[in-house]
Every structure is written in C-alpha cells, then in structure tokens.
Image (cartoon, rainbow, N blue to C red):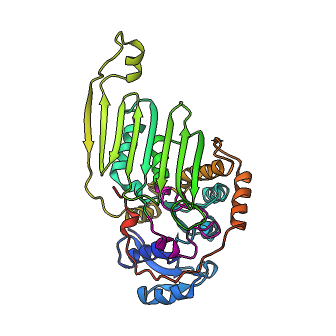
Amino acid sequence: MDKTINTAIVGIGNIGTAHAVALRDNLVPGMALSAVCDVNEERLTAAKSLFPLAKCYTDIDSLLQDETIDAVVIATPHPCHADLAIKVLESGRHVLVEKPIDIRVSQAQRLCDIADGKDKTFGIMLNQRTDPIFSRARDIVKNGQLGELKRSIWIITNWYRTQHYYDSGSWRATWIGEGGGVLLNQAPHNLDLWQWIVGMPTNVRAFCEVAKYHRIEVEDEATIMTRYANGATGLFVTTTGEYPGTNRLEIAGTLGKIVIENGTLTFWKLKQDEEQVRKVSKDSFVNIPYDVETYSPADSGDGHIKILADFSAAIQTGKKLIAPGRDGLNELLISNAAYLSAWEGNVDISLPFDNDRFNALLDEHIRHSAGLKTAKLHMPSGGYSERWQVKW
C-alpha cells in the first residue's frame, strides 16, 4: 500500500465499535483508525479508553473539518445512512456505508446519483458476498450452467432474536429509529445475495407480520413472493421468531438445481435440457440423467474485514469493489416493495414502484411510532459477533 488511509467511524454502537477495533488492531491492510464520532457522549467517553489514539467527535460536521481524514465508515441507525454518506462524499472523502444503504429507495437513489458525480470510492457493507459458497452459486447461474431460471426459494429463519435484544437499544424495532424490522436489519444480506445470484424481480407481493413474536412495532416475520421477466417465480421467508431456524436456498433451472444448506452447495447438473426433453420426448415418464457436484468451502474468515480490505484496496488501486454502494439499491428496492405491498393490502407491486406513495406511507408509520424506547445504554467492547456471520 502506498499510503495509510486515515479512517473515521461514525456511530460506535455494536457494529461500529467492531469496525473500529478491527482498524485499531491493524487487521485491515492500508487502513488506520484516526477518529470516531457519535452523538452520545457516554459512548465517546468509553471510546476514549478503547481507542486512545483516535480523535473523538460529537457530530459529523466537526469530523469533516478534520483534513487528515481520508475515508469514513457510516455505522449509525439506518435512517441516517444516506444523508451522512452524502455529507462525506461532498466533503471529498471516500465512504463505506453499513447495510441497509438507507430506509427509502428515494434517498438511496439520491446518494448513488451524487456518488456517481464524485471521484471517490463508495462501498456498502454487504459482507456475506465474500462467502465463496454464494460466489459459486452466482457463477453457476450467471454462466448459464443452470439454464433458464424457473424458481428460487430462500427460507432464512435462523435470525432468532429474544425480546431482550429488541429492548437493548432505544432505536431498535421502531419505525422512527430503525425504519423497519427483520427486512431492514437482519435479512438485507440475504435479499442482496438473492438478487445478486438470480437477478431482480419485476413484481413483488408480500405479507409482513408486525409484532407476531415480540413486543415491537415493526415486522418480525415476512414472506415475499416474486416474479421475474422470464416468468420465473421466487419465494423468500424470514423471521426472528423461530427456533431452530432454517437457512436453505434452492434455485431450479432447465439444466438442473442448486441447493445451499448446512454450508454445502449441491448442484444437480442435467445432461439434457429439461425443456427440450419435456417438449420432444415420446415417453410420458422419463429419468433425465444428471451429475451431482458438491461444494463445501472451508471457513473463509470474517467477511466484514474482507469488505473493509476490499474498500481499502479500491481506494489505493481503483479495483472494482465486491459490494459497490449502488448495489445497495437492489435489496432495498425489494424490501421497500414488500412493505408497500403489505401496507396496500398484500397487493402485487411492480418494480420500480411509486416512491412518493411509499414515502407517504412510511412517514405515516413514523408519525404513529411510539418513538425511541427507553433503554439502558449498552457499551460494546468490540469484535465481530457470531450473530453477524453466515449461520447454517
């Protein structure tokens, strides 16, 4: 690396502190922790002992006056992401945003458009993209080895959370503080990987169950049904209220089927295109021959550090990011559409949808929000929690 990238972390809650610890401990080549920023002065007091060499700021405007800062990581509550990232870009710094990119597609689009006009690196923390099992699935689909896509189903119900989890942060599980529930907090990784592998749908219909398992004001269970331009269909089921949960992704095409479960990708690879067999066979019942391939990669390390290292390398060399900031739009488009579908009576929503209508309904939910909860301040000690990793 030619130059150390002096980096600031904005928002030093659980994930922000973990990022700061990684930089403090020199786990990310080419990046160093230079400053931390949080509006909560108690957190900053604790940060001074955790990060004695880092400068401390109570607001981003003061932080951005520090000319030594080269890059900023945004790890604040979701509704602030786009606004803060825009400030960073307009100040002439590189920026990495925690997922989701924002709570509104309109705000996320504004951020992306501004980023397009800046000569700065703009990334998003979609760390599960670094898992080789998902890269392998994407390669199979994108290279045509699965043929024409027919269907995909992802049951991702092992995001289990207790009531204590939701009570541990004043912003959690409120419309005003978090902007949504399981679709905005836990499942963005999976929604991103889903579209990254099989592509974006044209239509979304959803059922978002509010407070089904917890005392919260947002959804803790969601079922999303999708349709694609070629007629394929999809189903996405997620919740924080089931135990033990399931993590199973199944993708079917005319040349076979992929199943990812328990850390193994299984690929049933047909030796003949099923569509051709179906159309021309003279028999009513046939057994199409196939090969079975399995892929079980070893633990590839922490994806958060890999995304940070990739961000660092992109700044230094201009390499293409694993998770460019603009890619954060796609999963948010799906989750926003799911909310809109649920709010409108579980109707079919075509993509792209009416942003003004979505924003009006979200604003209505925010106006009726109970507000930020009273919660005892939890001071994170750093390190990446197991709950943020791919769980089988």
The single residue placed furthest to the top in the displayed view is 282
**Does residue 6 appear in the picture of this structure?**
no
Taking 158 as reference, is 213 left or right?
right
Q: Position of residue 351 (x, y in %)?
A: 63, 43
Where residue 293 sits, quadrant-wise, is top left
Question: Which residue is more in the foreground, 295 or 27?
Answer: 295
Give the quarter of the figure containing the C terminus: bottom left
Where is 295 relative to 49, above or below?
above
Q: Main secondary structure of the magenta part?
A: loop
- Please say whether residue 64 is one of the residues in the magenta stretch: no
Where is 287 relative to 324, above or below?
above
Where residue 228 sits, quadrant-wise, is top right
Question: Which residue is more in the foreground, 107 or 343?
Answer: 343
Tell me which segment is drawn in magenta: 161-189
Q: Position of residue 391 (x, y in %)?
A: 35, 58
Question: Which residue is more in the foreground, 71 or 240?
Answer: 240
Residue shown at the point (46%, 35%) measured from the top left: 151
Residue shown at the point (33%, 22%) measured from the top left: 272
Q: Position of residue 194 (x, y in %)?
A: 46, 47
Tally of numbered discs: 0
**Does residue 248 appear in the picture of this structure?**
yes
- Please say whether residue 185 is one of the residues in the magenta stretch: yes
Where residue 275 sits, quadrant-wise, is top left
Residue shown at the point (35%, 78%) measured from the top left: 25
Question: Which residue is more in the foreground, 313 or 327?
Answer: 327
Q: Position of residue 223 (x, y in %)?
A: 53, 48
Residue shown at the point (60%, 76%) measured from the top left: 373
Where is 196 relative to 386, above or below?
above
Give the quarter of the figure containing the N terminus: bottom left
